[in-house]
Image (cartoon, rainbow, N blue to C red):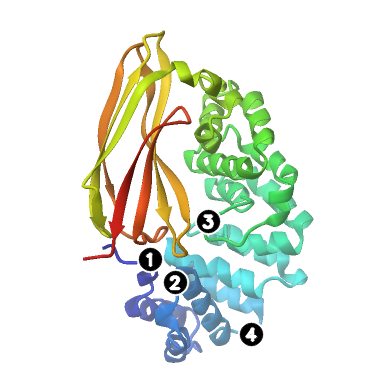
Amino acid sequence: MAEPLKALYDGLFIEQFAAKVKEAWQPFNERSFAERVRGGEWERLELKARARAITLALGAELPSKYEEAIAVLFQIDEQCSGLPYIFFPDFVEVYGLEQPDWELSFAALARFTRRSTAEFAIRTFILTDQERTLAQMHAWADDSNEHLRRLASEGIRPRLPWAQALPLFKRDPSPILPILEKLKQDPSLYVRKSVANNLNDIAKDHPELVIELAERWHGEHEWTDWIVRHGCRTLIKRAEPRVMQLFGYSAAADEETLFTSATLNVDPSEVAIGGEVQLSYKVQLRDTARTKVRIEYGIDFVKSGGKTSQKRFLLSDKEYAGGAVASGTRTHRFADLTTRKHYEGVHRLTLWVNGVQAASSELLVKGEV
């Protein structure tokens, strides 16, 4: 099993980082910092909670004046890149929310996001002062640096994973749409992925809004088309008729004519957590004109409380000739991930053809051997 992400913050990391701070600011107490970081329930903390523990330890050991503490971090941030250093923008979130400090805080977030990401930290500023923060996001959307343009989109996602929710944008996403409009033809795939994920977030609460936007944007530019297609993936899974038509799939109302039979088999029929199964599927298409077919399999994962939650996985998405047989195999592993923990119980597996359930099977998931 892969090491959990929180393992990034091991003893060596803490010691090496403390040495960097000490070199930049001699009064820094490396030993006290390390003790503060690893005190309390450190071993039980996950990645973001560990990052916050480092933030608070820095706050206790760096100069008490915010601008002086940031100046120390500015001396070493070029040496600190990657996910582990999300505590740099987190430091800004915790200690830089006083209104007189906002200009410096925005400058710090813009600087730190280039080497890590400020997508989590910026959300507290949005919740504190939406108007002022969105004005800054608009400016970042025009920046020449792709990391800042990506922050302009990623930071305002209504349903950003691992982040605190933005209920105001879940209720009404209209304030963020002008920023997405600015980025809809961005040359950076890094930015376009964020815009698409933002649209997918919005589609979960306001599908009609995203459908109308997709119809308006589609065909403007190849980069925009990519964003629209990726941003509508949840709507495609739901087989929304207007979206299916937009991307060349047969509409849900026509699905009864698309295939004559379908099967989904799982081997073995029982698997231990950590094991894997082989899925095999077969769809007999009707003898009609060529058609675009999207085939997925879904798993109703058993949750800790006994309820289930379905997740779908793509098998095939292409055009088929009339009368063709679409078939294939896929290995699915039931190893625990940072984003999914498996539980014992009967899991229902389903086969979906253009958003319509075509076949099903069952799998018993047992405890780890």
Horizontal placement of 107 versus 189: left or right? right
Which callout, 1 or 3, points at the residue further toward the start of the chain?
Answer: 1
- Contact (Cβ within 8 Å) of mark 2 with mark 4: no
Classify 87 as above or below 320.
below
Q: Residue at x 47, y 19 (%)?
A: 256
Q: Residue at x 40, y 8 (%)?
A: 288
Classify 326 as above or below 322.
below
Q: Residue at x 30, y 66 (%)?
A: 3
* Disc marking residue 161: 3
Residue linked to disc 1: 5
Cα–Cα span, label 3 and label 4: 32 Å
Which callout, 4 or 1, points at the residue further toward the start of the chain?
Answer: 1
The amino acid beneath tag 2 is Glu
Mark 4 or 1, which is nearer the eye?
1
Label 2: element kind: loop
The amino acid beneath tag 4 is Ser
Cα–Cα span, label 2 and label 3: 14 Å
Which callout, 3 or 4, points at the residue further toward the start of the chain?
Answer: 4
Which residue is nearer to you in this view: 158 or 250?
250
Residue linked to disc 2: 46
The amino acid beneath tag 3 is Pro
Cα–Cα span, label 1 and label 2: 8 Å
- x, y percentage for residue 61? 54, 86
Residue linked to disc 4: 64
Q: Quadrant of the C terminus?
A: bottom left
* Disc marking residue 43: none
